[in-house]
Amino acid sequence: MAGKADGTFLGFDFSTQQIKVIAIDNKLETIHESAVKLDDLKEFNTSGGCHVHDDNLTVTAPTIMWVKALDILLDNMKTSGFDFSRVAALSGSGQQHGSVFWKTGALEILSNVQPNKQLHEQLKDCFSVADSPIWMDSSTSKQCRELEQILGGPQKVADITGSRAYERFTRNQIAKIYQTKPEAYNKTERISLVSSFAASLFIGGYAPIDDSDGSGMNMLDIHSRTWSEPCLQATAPGLSEKMGPVVPSHKVVGSVSSYFVQSFGFSPDCQVVAFTGDNPGSLAGMRLKQGDIAISLGTSDTVFLWLTDPKPALEGHILANPVDTSAFMALLCFKNGSLMREKIRDRCAGGSWETFSQHLDSTPMGNNGNLGLYFDVQEILPQAVGTFRFNSKGEQVSSFSDDEEVRAVIEGQFLSKRVYAAKLGYSLGIDCELTGPESRVLATGGASSNKAILQVMADVFNSPVYIQDVANSACLGGAYRAKHGLMGGSSVPFSEVVKDAPDFTLGATPNPEADQIYLKLCEEYKKAENIVLSEQTIS
């Protein structure tokens, strides 16, 4: 086997629609990528990697499908000549909130799989619930309300677990299984997340849940990073034994099993580092550090935050940080992302991004006090729909000029992100100790190629903006974390492990007067949003 100095590292991602892998060498350069699309496994008849049931609320995926996809992925790598003997460590991620229910006796089978047969053939009868609930499921409203009632309200649930009760979260799915399929629950000896399930396949035993993915379950105390006893008791009897321990995300959970050594040529010394959720995996892949905020500009916009002093709220999610056991991360999602920007581009700039940018550059920071909130579809943060324009006096108006409209949509979207990030404990600007080179915005996604948009981002957040071209960031994060775990985990800073990764590109720096303008405009945005929400309630 190759030693730590020249070994390779694998990062897997068991995502909703495919299973992917990236291999990097010790210099962090990508040397292999491959994937298997789940819908290509025709016998499972999935669409987008899942089954949407007749009630349009229940969404599941066949558990064994993930195992077969892994079989195919590894076979393809072997056929391509990939040298598994050089892999020093592997890790990865799984779609968050999905759950796997191992049947009593499954551990015995998992621990003794034979190299002359594929995994999916040997594990097909190992699950008490054959179809795993996944993150798209929204059938557990009853169980969510029960948890909030038992614990003392949604804010209390958020204070403990980092999020109010959400339908897709695993605790609520477990409660539903217990209530509606008690026989299946009673026949379950272990419950895994998709992430720990994937790690279990590699070590030939039950891998523990890591604290970062575990904090997206409504069941983990994010402060102690252990299971919350009140949440366990509110869910189902005997649950603690079925969940197993919680470990830090950098923990080595075992070596690859003899099955992988004999079937693919892995070294028996190859270490498996705890798998985590896809969002924490992406944080690692994007190499966030203290003071950073990452903004993905896509169909929906997603914000990743590095927090040291989180403030759980009814909006957004706070998770244990996967690369620093003393820190946290937060997630915010905004539905009205690029589609809203494109709609304004088409209406005000003739469909041209170049003209759109010219409109943006021709208007001053702060848009002369004109402010817009644009929600073409029902937004998550805030829960509103419609277009709302306010002039410099805070009065609602029916229209802006094309120049004002373009700047209003971009400034409004970034002001919203800054306001909601602050609610969860993120600080920046003149009141922040992390100003200067330690505070960065990392931009990714389609709109991150637009320099005019990046300039507004830099000004609103009063931080330099760097562009990240990170494809498959969760996969890459798995490979980085594999090396981190092998090199010592908590005894070695993650930033030290990834210091030689390719540099980001500086996209924009804030104007000196920007923060004074946008601190004031943040307050105006809050007032405008309150007016919008009051009107939504009335309607």
Image (spheres, rainbow, N blue to C red):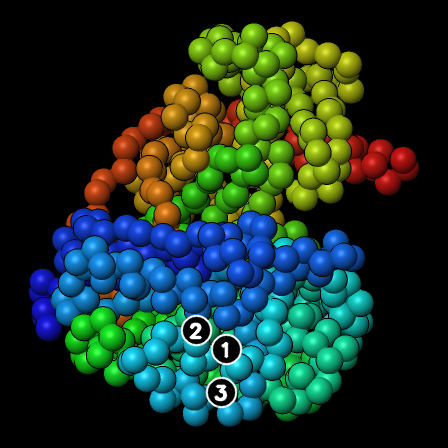
Do residues under tags 3 and 1 come within 8 Å of each other at their CB atoms? no
Q: Position of residue 116 (x, y in %)?
A: 30, 80
Decide which of 146, 108 is in the foreground and name it: 108
Three-letter code, disc 1:
Lys
Q: Is residue 336 above or below residue 320?
A: above
Q: CA distance from mark 1 to mark 2?
A: 6 Å
Q: CA distance from mark 2 to mark 3?
A: 13 Å
Question: Where is mark 3, residue-wise?
Answer: 106
Do residues under tags 1 and 2 come within 8 Å of each other at their CB atoms? yes
Decide which of 8, 330 is in the foreground and name it: 8
Three-letter code, disc 3:
Ala
Q: Position of residue 77 (x, y in %)?
A: 25, 59
Q: Is residue 456 above or below residue 13?
A: above
Q: Position of residue 29 (x, y in %)?
A: 18, 49
The label on residue 120 is 2
Question: Where is mark 1, residue-wise?
Answer: 124
Left or right of 11 in this view: 157: right
